[in-house]
Amino acid sequence: MTKQQANWSPYDFNGGTCVAVAGADYCVIAADTRMSTGYNILTRDYSKICKLADKSLLASSGFQADVRALQKNLEARHQIYQHQHNKQMSCPAMAQLLSNTLYYKRFFPYYAFNVLGGLDNEGKGCVFTYDAVGSYEKVGYSSQGSGSKLIMPFLDNQLKSPSPLLLPAQDAVTPLSELEAIDLVKTAFASATERDIYTGDKLEIVVLNREGIRREYMELRKD
Amino acid sequence: MEAVKQGSAAIGLRSKTHVVLACVNKAQSELSSHQRKIFKVDDHIGVAIAGLTADGRVLSRYMRSECINHSFTYESALPVGRLVVQLADKAQVCFLPFDFVLVVLVLGSSDFLLKLDFCLVVIGSSFGELWRDLETRDTPRSRRAKSLQILQTYCLTRVAGHYKINNSVEVCTQRSWKRPYGVGLLVGGLDESGAHLYYNCPSGNYFEYQAFAIGSRSQAAKTYMERKFETFDSASREELIKHALFAIKETLQGEKLKSSICTVAVLGVGEPFHVLDQQTVQELIKSFEVVEEEAPAPQEPSAAPEEAAAPAAEAAAAPMEE
C-alpha cells in the first residue's frame, strides 16, 4: 500500500525578494512589490516591508498570508512591550523576539523568509537574517526570497564582509555612504529582475537613519 | 466605593475633539515618589484611576490586552463604549441572564427551615413559576432537592447563608477570597463617534460624562466644572487643559498648584494619548496664573470706566425715558 500524500498544501509561494544593507549610521531595507502565485501575478503593488518599531523594519518574502500574520503578531507584542517598559523595542531585542516567534511554530512554520533591518542602540545600522524557523545571525547585509541566489553573490562581491569567525570581532557594517548603498541595492534589483520571474514591477526602498525614516520607489521591469 | 472616595482626586473632561485627564499626585511621604494614576490603554484611550491603585493597574492591564486583541482581530481601534461595557461586566462575578429583580423566597414551614441550610431569596417575574414548582413538591426533602437544583441552574454559590439571584448583583462580596475592584476609573477615549469620557464604578455601573471628578475633595472640582461645562464641548485643546488645571486647583483647597503634584494627559483628533511632561505643565500653570493675576488688575481701571459708563447709561436712559 503506497503512502497517502496530501493533495492540498497549507502554504503558497507568493515570490518576491528582500534585501537589507547596514551602514555606519544608516540602514537600507529594500523589497520588490510584486506578489505572484504560480505563473500569475496577483498584484504589482504590494509592500513587503513593515515597520515594527521606530528603529526596526521587517522585510519578508515567501507566503504573504503567513508574513502578514507574523507582522501582526510582532506589532501586538511590541505594543505590550511599550506598555510595560515605556519605551520602544531596540532592534536587537526585536531580532530575538522574531527568532522566538518563528521557533514557537517550529512544527508548522511561518513560511516567511525574513530580513530585519534597523539601528541599534548606538545608532549603527544592523541587519539580521533569518530562516523559516528562526535561526538568525547579525550580518552587515543580506537578501532573502526568490531572487536572493542572484543578489547574494553580488552583494558578497561588493560588500565583502569580514568573516564572523575572526577575532577580534570586526565590524560588519559597510563603509559605503548612504547614497552609494542605495545605488548598489538598485543595481542588484535591476539585475535580479532580469532573470527571476517573481521579482519585478517596482522596488520599494526604505532608509532608516538618525533623522528618521525615508521611503523611495524605483520602477523595475514589468515582465 | 469608599476606596474611591478616599483616593486622591482624578478629573476628566472632554470637548468634541479632545479629552483631558488630570490627577493629583499624593505621595505617601515626602521621601517617597507618587503613584502613577494615569495609564495609557491605547493610542486612543487613556484612563485615570482613584482608589486602590493596585486594582487600577490590574484593570488597565486588562484593558490594554482587550485593545490589542481587538486591533489584532479587526485591524481597527476598539470603540471606547465597548471597552467600558467589558470593564463593567468584569466587575460582576455572577452575571445572570434572567429577568428577575432581587429574589427572596422563604421555603416552607419553620421546621423545614431548620432542616434547610439555606434560604432562597427570589422576587420577580419568574417568582410565580418557581414558587408553584416548589409548592408541588410535598416533602421537605423534594423541596430541598428542587431548590438545590434551582441554585445550581443559576450558578449560585453559598454566600454567608444567603443565595441571591439577581440579574446584576455582586455575589462576590462575602467570599473570603474574592472582593470587588476597589477603584473608580475615568476612561477617556476617542473613536469614530467622537470623544467620550466614562466613569466606571466598582459596582459595575458606568456613565458617560462631559466632565467628572472622583476621589477626595472631588466635589470642589465638580462644582467648578458644573459652572463651566457648557463651554467644554466647543472648547479648544488649550482651554480644556486650563479648565482641567483649575479644577485640580479647586481640589487642592489652598495648596499651591505645581506641576510636581499634578499629572495631566491629553488625547484628541490627530493626537495620540500622552501624558504631558512636568515642564509643559509648569509652563501652562504659569501662563494661567499670569492671566488670573492680570484679571484683577484691569478690573480696577475698568471699574472706573464702568462708573463713568453708568452715569452715561443713566443719562442715555433718561433721554430715552423722556
Image (spheres, coloured by chain):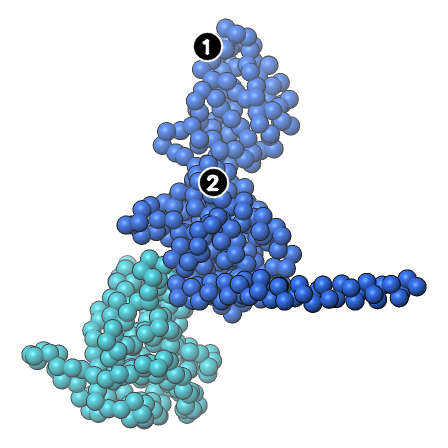
Chain colours: A cyan, B blue
Label ID, residue B175: none
Q: Are marks 1 and 2 in contact (CB under 8 Å)?
A: no
Q: Position of residue A89 (x, y in %)?
A: 30, 67
Question: Toward which corner of the image does residue A200 lie, by quadrant?
Answer: bottom left
How far apart are the two marked residues, 1 and 2, measured between alpha carbons?
A: 43 Å
Residue on which the image places disc 2 = B5
Q: Chain of mark 2?
A: B
Q: Is residue B54 above or below residue A71?
A: above
- Do dots 1 and 2 share one subunit? yes
Q: Position of residue B322 (x, y in %)?
A: 93, 64
Q: Position of residue B262 (x, y in %)?
A: 42, 55
User: Nearer the observer, disc 1 or disc 2?
Assistant: 2
Q: Chain of mark 1?
A: B
Q: Position of residue B251 (x, y in %)?
A: 49, 49
Q: Amino acid at mark 2?
A: Lys
Q: Is residue A66 above or below residue B251?
A: below
